[in-house]
Image: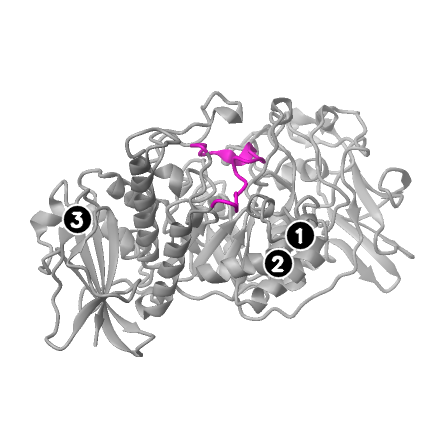
């Protein structure tokens, strides 16, 4: 990248002391501010030397633990995209540790109001690196999406002082649960420093998801009080259990928000560089994210910041991979999304990052933002089209069997358009953004009133159903129907080709009361209640995971050819006809797979039998004279009929 010709940014050790370096094209002057050990009293304000667009200063005798911040002076003219205000203390974009969390205050937005008492101070740390091994991730892997605080805050097996923190994930009780589920990698929702959206404090609410970041390398002290050391030790403990760690990162926008947002870091250092603006209207921030601003990922300085952030987490903590929120922004320039964007090339070419796992949320809210299937390899992509097609099929929508089968088979229509022969689909049915699995079958509409936005926020079309009553019920029959539907949805997920992702808590029937946008519910709405998980669902999830690991077909990603690898059958064992594929209400099908049974170490056939109807149906599968079919989950005899609203896995027994 063009920015590689100047010294490393941030804090680095030099032969004659400690170097502080920051980039700004438009600032007239940048000062380094040093603070006392409590981070409250500003001890000195030192002008940084300018060399082109690089501002730096070398100081002797800077000890680890030193608190610092930045102030940038220059023209203050928001109408021209210039926000220089030396009264604003700014966080170094390359800060790797902060001495406290961000909190919203009106002074953060007011010109001339000093904010040193409000803004966290960056902390000078001793760099420690690890030698990262190959990522703990393989084809067909199970990713477990975790919001750290909601997942651990109520867990009785976690020491109280660790609850709600990343360190809790290293506790034996947590690792035992993950191992039981056969988790390949945990995907941690954002753990870097964030600030609450400004409308939340007046409502008495807090951002519990973290998708409003300020400093891309600094871990949030509320979730990771031990900083990068805590993350590194947790990753090591999970690695020892055979579980990888993926970080969910946000490089599409920042918590500085729109024109009326706070000045905390990049806005104050060089707003015109770090954010995208309307052509000819530099005072107008482009909002392709729906969050008030859009980070300029096509600028070389921003690209370097992103690549350096990823390298930091791999080298300092051994992270296996990354999921990118609203990832279409990463490939955008003023002409739109580019599959060959410079940032993608830089990530793929970097020797530290080239073997890491990359996962894209392949859309943003801007023009042409929906890019499912258009990211370059090796990106996996969140497949919301498969999600919706699976939901619609199980809801009972007409004319959906073809789309349902396509989703099961790896979505070749989405992922083969660039001549690829393998799926890069990451299949999921529920994620943090939307209904939980239990709410998907318990609510026909969203119920987001607690978010304080008049139930206007969140998706309106969830392809959900309530099984006869909206919300909590005392009727045991309806409760049974809901449990049955969740089991069928989980089975569908584990039967699908490609990598799969489960939302933490779905294996135990967690409900958010119909809230499908619970980002502001840092409370019992999102916190998992470990005292009453649905044991039947937990056991079903564990069996599904073991079954998926048993059969080699689920580790394969090549698109099916229909020649000796897959057959689509009716419940009577005959091939589905064109008429049945096109029938508006086809309720059942069999996906017959050629596979290896890793237990028996031989080739076999696995039948995935789907019955979405509300009645059981007889099943008759083609068999060789010497063989029989058995239930792959229970290892019992194959049933004569498949239950209503179910997915049954049958394996040919020799």
Query: Is residue 278 visible to the viewer in this orientation of the structure?
Result: no
Which residue in the protein does label 2 denote? 171
Q: Position of residue 211 (x, y in %)?
A: 57, 40
Q: Secondary structure at mark 1?
A: loop
Q: Secondary structure at mark 3?
A: loop
Residue visible at 27% across and 70% down in the picture: 595
Q: Is residue 593 magenta?
A: no
Which residue in the protein does label 3 denote? 616
The quadrant in which residue 602 appears is bottom left
Mark drawn on residue 159: 1
Q: Is residue 277 left or right of residue 8?
A: left
Query: Is residue 68 visible to the viewer in this orientation of the structure?
Result: yes
Q: Is residue 204 left or right of residue 44?
A: left
Q: Closer to the camera: disc 1 or disc 2?
A: 1
Query: Main SS type for the magenta part?
Result: loop
The residue most toward the top is 454
Magenta stretch: give its range: 513-532
* Real-space Cα separation, disc 1 to disc 2, in angstroms: 8 Å
Q: Position of residue 299 (x, y in %)?
A: 59, 46
Q: Position of residue 259 (x, y in %)?
A: 62, 27
């Amino acid at each position: 990248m063009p920015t590689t010709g100047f010294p490393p940014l941030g804090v680095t050790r030099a032969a004659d002391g400690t170097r502080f370096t920051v980039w700004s094209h438009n600032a007239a002057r940048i000062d380094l501010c040093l603070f006392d050990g409590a981070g409250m009293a500003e001890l000195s304000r030192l002008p940084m030397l300018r060399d082109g667009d690089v501002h730096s200063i070398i100081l002797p005798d800077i000890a680890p633990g030193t608190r610092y911040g930045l102030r940038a002076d220059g023209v203050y003219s928001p109408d021209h995209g210039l926000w220089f205000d030396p009264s604003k203390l700014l966080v170094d974009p390359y800060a790797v540790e902060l001495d406290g969390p961000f909190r919203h205050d009106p002074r953060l937005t007011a010109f001339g109001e000093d904010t040193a008492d409000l803004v966290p101070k960056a902390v000078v740390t001793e760099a420690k690196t690890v030698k990262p091994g190959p990522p703990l991730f393989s084809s067909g892997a199970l990713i477990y999406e975790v919001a750290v605080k909601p997942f651990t805050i109520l867990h009785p097996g976690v020491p109280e002082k660790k609850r709600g923190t990343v360190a809790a994930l290293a506790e034996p009780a947590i690792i035992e649960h993950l191992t039981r589920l056969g988790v390949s990698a945990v995907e941690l929702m954002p753990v870097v420093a964030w600030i609450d959206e400004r409308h939340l404090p007046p409502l008495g609410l807090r951002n519990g998801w973290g998708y409003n970041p300020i400093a891309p390398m600094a871990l949030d002290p509320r979730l990771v009080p031990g900083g990068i050391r805590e993350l590194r030790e947790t990753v090591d403990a999970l690695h020892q259990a055979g579980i990888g760690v993926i970080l969910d990162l946000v490089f599409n926008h920042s918590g500085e928000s729109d024109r009326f947002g706070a000045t905390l870091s990049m806005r104050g250092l060089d707003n015109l560089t770090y954010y995208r603006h309307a052509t000819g209207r530099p005072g107008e921030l482009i909002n392709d994210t729906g969050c008030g601003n859009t980070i300029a990922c096509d600028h070389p300085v921003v690209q370097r910041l992103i690549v350096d952030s990823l390298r930091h987490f791999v080298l300092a903590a051994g992270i296996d991979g990354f999921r990118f929120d609203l990832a279409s922004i990463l490939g955008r320039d003023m002409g739109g999304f580019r599959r060959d964007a410079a940032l993608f090339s830089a990530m793929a070419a970097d020797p530290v990052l080239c073997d890491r796992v990359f996962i894209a949320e392949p859309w943003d809210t801007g023009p042409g933002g929906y890019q499912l299937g258009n990211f370059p390899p090796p990106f996996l992509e969140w497949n919301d089209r498969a999600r919706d097609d699976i939901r619609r099929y199980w809801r009972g929508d007409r004319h959906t069997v073809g789309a349902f089968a396509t989703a099961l088979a790896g979505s070749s229509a989405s992922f083969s358009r660039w001549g690829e022969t393998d799926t890069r689909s990451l299949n999921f049915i529920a994620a943090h953004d939307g209904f939980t699995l239990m709410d998907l079958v318990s609510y026909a509409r969203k119920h987001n009133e607690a978010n304080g936005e008049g139930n206007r926020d969140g998706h309106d079309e969830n392809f959900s159903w309530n099984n006869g009553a909206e919300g909590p019920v005392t009727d045991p029959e309806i409760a049974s129907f809901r449990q049955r539907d969740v089991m069928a949805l989980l089975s569908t997920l584990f039967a699908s080709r490609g990598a799969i992702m489960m939302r933490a808590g779905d294996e135990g029937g967690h409900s958010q009361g119909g809230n499908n946008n619970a980002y502001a519910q840092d409370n019992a709405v999102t916190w998992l209640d470990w005292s009453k998980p649905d044991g039947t669902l937990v056991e079903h999830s564990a069996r599904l995971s073991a079954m998926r690991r048993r059969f080699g077909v689920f580790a394969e990603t090549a698109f099916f050819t229909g020649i000796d690898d897959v057959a689509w059958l009716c419940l009577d064992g005959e091939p589905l006809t064109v008429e049945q594929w096109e029938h508006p209400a086809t309720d059942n099908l069999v996906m017959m797979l050629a596979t290896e049974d890793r237990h028996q170490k031989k080739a076999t056939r696995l039948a995935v039998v789907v019955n979405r109807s509300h009645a059981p149906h007889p099943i008759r599968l083609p068999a060789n004279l010497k063989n029989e079919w058995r239930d792959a989950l229970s290892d019992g005899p194959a049933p004569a009929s498949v239950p209503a609203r179910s997915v049954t896995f049958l394996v040919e027994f020799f």
